[in-house]
Every structure is written in C-alpha cells, then in structure tokens.
Amino acid sequence: MRKALAVCWASSAAWAVTTPALAQTAPSTVAAPQEQASEAPDEQPSSGFGDIIVTAQKRSERLNDVPLSITAVTGEQLTTAGVLSPEDLVKVVPGFSYARTLFGAPSFIIRGVGVTDSSLSLTPAVSAYVDQVPLPYLVQASGAAFDLERVEVLKGPQGTLFGQNSTGGAVNFIAAKPTDTFQVGGSFTYGRYNQADIEAFVSGPITNTLRGRLAVRHESRDGWQVSVTRPDDRLGVRDFTEARALLDWEPSDSLKFELNVNGWKDRSDTQAFQFQSLSPQAPPAAGGATEFVDAVAPIYTQPTARNPRLADWGVELAPGLPAFYQQGAPGSSLRKDSSFVQVSLKGDVQLTDTVSLTSISAFSHYKQSSPFDLDATKYWQGNFRITGDIENIFQELRLAGDMDQLKWMIGGNYSHDAVDENQLYQLAGSNSNIAGFRFANAQSDFSHRVTTFSAFGDVQYEIVPDLTAQASARYTNYKDNFRGCLRDAIGDQWSTALQNLANNILGASPSLTFAPGQCLSLHLDSAPGVAPPTFSVPQPVTRSLQEDNISWRGSLSWKISPNDMIYANITRGYKSGGFPGVVALSDDQFDPIGQESVLAYEAGFKVAFADRKIQLNGAGFRYDYTGKQLISYVPNPALGPSLALVAIPKSRITGFELDATVRATQELTLSAAATYIDSKVTSSFNAFTPLIVPKDIRGEQLPNTPKWQLQGGVDYLVPMSSAIDLHLGANARYQSSANSSFGDEPSFLIRGYTIVDAFAGIESSNGKWSAQLWGRNLTNKYYLTSILQGGDTIGRTTGMGATYGITLSFKY
C-alpha cells in the first residue's frame, strides 16, 4: 500500500503573481473553500482591501475578527516570494526564524521559542499542520508548502486547540481545494544553476457530489556549491518531487468528506560547510590524536572566503590514518534518500442548525537516509548518516456549536508515534582517542513509542454587543517508551576502547568483558569518586517518561467597529519532555528531561483606515519561559563533559510586532512589518559553550533569536492594454545579529543581514497566463544560516547567493 501511495506526487499551479505582503491585508478576497465565515463581511469598496477567511481557531472567521496574532499569506504570494519549503517562511513571516541542527533536523522558532536537537525524533516547540492534520516531527514537513490556498502562522502558545508542542506557535498549511468547475494549470521555471521546476494541477467535478484535485511538482537544480580544494567538484543538487490528490464528497447539504493523499520524495544533496577555524577538542597535551589536525592545518590556514558558493567535503583519508576509517564513509556523495506519504480523511456532519461534528483520521509514514559531512574539509573526519522510520496514527473528534452570542467546541484526540532511528558516526579526530583506541564506525540506535491522549474545550461568549470573552483548555496525557543503544558499526573499535577504559584506566572491579555487537553505554553502580568503581555490563537502555498537563487560554476582545479590534490574551502552553539522541558512553546520558512551558501575555489591535485602504496590526507580548530544553554538555565524573538533554530553569521574552499595508493607489500597494524581541535567561544555569567551556549563561540572549526583523514590499500592477497588465514588485527583509548557541562565543555569532528580491512580468488581465522575470538575493549578499562545531573544526553554512530566472504559467 505504501508503494501505491508513494507514486502519487504533488504540486501547485502557481500561476498568478501578486505582492508578497502579508495576506491579512491582501487586496483580494480569499474564502476558505467549503466553509463559511462566522459572520458575513460587509460589502467593501473596490479600492480597499477585501477579507481574509482563516481557520486559526478551527472555525472559519474573518482574520480581523480573530483575537490572535496571525500572519496569513496566500498561495499566490508564497509563489511570488519564492517560498518552496517551510524554511522559506522567513521571507514572509515576521518573528519567524529557522535553524538546522547538527545532523540536519529542522527547527522552527517563533518569537524566540523553539528547540534544537540533533535527533530525528525532535519534538518541536512550533508545530506544523496541513488542513489541521498534524505533522508531529518537523522532518515530515519538507513538502508541506506547495499547492496552497494559504498558510496561517499562529504566534504564541497554541496548546488549547492545536495541542502540546505548540509553545512557540503553529504553522497551518491550507491546501488548495477541488473546484466546482473544471480547471487546469501549470508553470515552468528555469533559473540559475540549471534550475528547472515544473508544476501542474487539474481540478473539478467528477460527479454531482464528488470533486477532485491532483497536483504535482518536481524541482531540479545542478550543484551550486564549489569545492575549495577541487574547483571542478560540485555539490548542492536539488531533486525533489511532491504530489497531492484530494477528493471532496458531499452527499448531502449536511454531510461532507475530504480525502487527502499526499507525499514527497527527496534525492537532493545535503549542504556542505564552509571552513571557519581549526578547533581541536582534545589537544596533544591532553592525549588527543594529531593526524587529522596536522593534515588540515597547512591547507586550511584561513577561513573560507566570503563567497556563498565555496565549501568543502570529504573525499580522502587524512595522512597517517589507517584505511579502516574509510569503511562505510559516504565519500563525495552526500545524496539523501528520504520520502513521506500521508493519508487523511476529514468528515463533517451538521447535526442540527447550530451543532456540527468533525472527525479527522490520519496515517503517515516517513523514511530517511541522510549523509552529513560536518568538518568542512576534504578529509573524512566527521561523517554521519542518519537513517530512520516514523509512523504516525492520529484521530480527532470534536463537536462545535454556534448560537450567535455563544460559540463552543469540545473534543479529544489520540495519537501514536513509532520512531526508529540509527545514527552512524565515522570519527577520526583528536577527541576520538580514548584509552589508546579510536572511535570509528560506531552507531547509536534509538526507538520511541509515544502515545498521547487529550481532551479540549473552547467557549466564546459575547458579553455585550462587540465585547467577547473566550476561554479554552486542554488536558494532555503523554507517554514515551524509549530504547537506546550505542554499539560498534564495523569492527570492535568502540567496545575495545570502552573495555580498556573501564578496566585499565578507571580500574573497574570486577573487570568487564564486552561481547561483539552488544550495547556499550556504561552504567556506574558505585557512587562517583568511589574507588575502585563498579560497572554493570552494558545493556540496552530502556526508560519510560509519562507526563500530563493542562494548557489554557483566556481572552477578551472588543470590536470597536466591524473592521477594528483590540484584544488581550493570557495563555499557558507546554512542550513535551523527551529523551536525547546522543552518543552515550554513559547510560545516564539517556536520562529524559521534563516538559517545558510558556506563560504568555499579549495585547494587540487590528484596525483599518481610509475605506480600508490602510490596514494596521500590532501586538505587544511577554513570555515567562520555564524549563527550556537544549542539548548541552554535562559533567561526568568518569568520562568528562558528555552530551545530554538539559533544561534552563527560567527565561524571559518581551517584544512587539507591527505591520501595515497601504493601497496607495488602485495600482500601487505598499507593505512593511517590524518585530522586536528581547530574550534573556533570567536564572543562573551552568552550561557549556560549543567549545566545551563551562559558563553561567544567565543574562544571555536565546540562540537564533535576532532582536530585530524588518520587512518591506512594493507591488505595482498597471494595465498596458485592455488584455495585458504590467506587474512589478520588490521586497526586502532584514534581521539583526544573533548567536547560534549559548555561551556568547564570538566564533558562533551570525551577523545581521539584508536580502532584496524583485520581479517584473506581464500577465493577462483575466488571469489565464503570466510571464515573470525574478531575482532573489539580488545584491548577492553573503549571510550565514548556522555555525556548528564539527569535530575538530568550526564550520558554517551559508544562504544562497544571487539567483534569477523566468517563470511561465497558465490557468484555464
């Protein structure tokens, strides 16, 4: 069945060209298909902005009626801005940040709330959904941003309606729905590095009660990265295919079903790092090995030039190292082989004139094989391959009522996740020398069986005309059964080294003997410092974590006029605890961490002026952040600093955001947005910097959280004739500097930058075709997206330099 589902690829027919301004102020009316707003919008003058209908509270409402901070962007605007994947949302969503962890797992961060972990099973602090169906692990969201009607980014804790793991917010991708009339469309894009993207869709009625939509997209591109030491060698191939098939069946006015089958296949390269500096983790004086360091030092004497294309990746063995280290190395191929398929069924039945019942059932399967080269040199020193398998089952059932003054919703959901992960390490650096042996070709296996039950409720009551109070709550019970094991991958290097460490260096009594292939994480039976230490023979580490919590939200909103609102919210949200995916020489490195929580205060407004030609939105907020989770080093009395999952007791985030869109004339639209975030650790906490230096991080800014994010855009659409329009536009975004990790190490500072995009094209006045020239990062700005320690080197990843191309599209 999986093979049958996987052949159903997906894509969008991005045919129209509009400004990438925020959609809550877009100059067109966007209605949610098959849904109606809770109140009919007033008729608007043609020179003003229309209404945006969103489902941020799991009911259809005008955006200006929702007492939440939301950025809603239409599918056409996403296409114009070049948003092809969730990480590209940084282009259009103020306050949204994106980071990749050491092994490539994505992390979404909203207003400073996010988590970065190296494991495939990372549970996010910003959750993702497609038509309210969850994608519980962000690695599954790679193909979510295509063939969309719009995307809604909800800021602040969203645990009451969207569940735990939404302490930062939620990103809801709304797929384009089947149409009542036959439509077909597509587009072709050709750009720099032989980029060739093709999209197509077909949509329309199948019978009187059945409608369908099929969309397909394939993205391809040659390698854009150039090796520093091998100028003819390229990396960065893009090979990504996605598809979505939708069937909407409406057998009666009171009953409808929506079937969604979607999937994607990724055979792209993983990005290589630029060399920044040599930073041996174990210098020779401390017993560290020298072969790799000695080989690198004369070649990589300076940081890689500030050219976004330059990088390096391993193709040979460092001099002085035996050929054994080459076994299993990925060599020059850093090609992924990952796939995802999901099937969901949503059913809605109108039980009475005021009460409806909704059921959402979903199954998804994700499979990954991703190689990474982290040392930024031509040698095999820090190579990793992450393989994994994730299966999810989800069921939600809810009742909703609308009785004019009173709106209510109650429901519950169940989910079960099966996560299996293997991390293969190929290390030959200075810190891989322990007890005279080398750590090479080792692997860690992790499995999680996660079961979650929850019940939620929401009630809105109009106390007096235009003054509404809202209260929401959710009870969640979460259980994670974990199994972890560190073992040899090839040969017996790890087991021999650890056996020698325990017996000859630490003086274990009685002495230990490791069998081939057994788990290797040592368990210290005696108290730290007791001599001689006693160890248990290592076994697979099995642990269980069970937690529960109650998320809640209280809100008061006042409709000053039909299009103007002020509101205030107080919200408590939770992110689940979990187990770290780390190289565990000691089994206590697998100890779980408890859930984190955010108590958020927010007040905001949404107002329109001058016949709705000007839309202004703003909000101020404060978050009290408890138990922020992160991977860090912890002291180990036998083995020294070791990686583990830890929690920062207290942090605080304050800030504000403001956005405006102005219809200056019938042809000209201007937009601007600003977000300010002041984040700080407010409690003492002894952490380790990326260079494994202990430090109290009290007072430090949260990682990957710039203080300022600014955006601005201009869109000009003017008729050239009765049949053809000229369409011009540009936008710019700026973010200030931020450190990629705690410790305030200057080597890990990501400096601020500004990116400018623009487009120019012609299109038919009836919207049936368009031709657009576009350019992204037109100034070829050099900027960084991450800085990481990869063994004995510090490496950095860059954003792409200038790209340009042409897009031809049609729709009939």
Image (cartoon, rainbow, N blue to C red):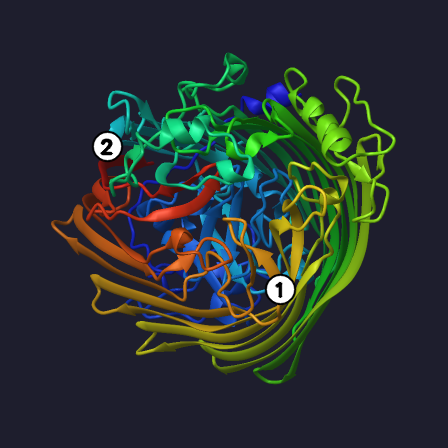
Cα gap from disc 2 to disc 1, whole angstroms: 47 Å
* Residue in the picture at 25% in, 47% down: 777
* Residue 780 rendering spot, x and y as whole percentages: 21, 45
Q: Is residue 205 left or right of residue 268?
A: right
Q: At 57% from the left edge and 43% from the top edge, which residue is drawn?
A: 138
The residue carrying pointer 2 sits among few (fewer than 14), some (14 to 19) or many (20 or more) residues within 10 Å by Cα, namely some
The label on residue 192 is 2
> Badge 1 is on which residue?
685
Q: Can residue 748 be seen in the rendering of this structure?
A: yes
Helix, strand, or loop for circle 1? loop
The type of residue carrying mark 2 is Arg
Q: Find out whether the residues at labels 2 and 1 contact each other: C-beta distance under 8 Å.
A: no
Question: How many residues crowd mark 1 within 10 Å: few (<14), some (14–19), many (20+)?
Answer: some
Residue type, mark 1 in image: Phe
Decide which of 668, 153 is in the foreground and name it: 153
18 shown above or below 658? above
Q: Indicate which label's residue lies in the foreground, 2 or 1.
A: 1
763 relative to 487, above or below: below
Which image quarter: residue 139? top right
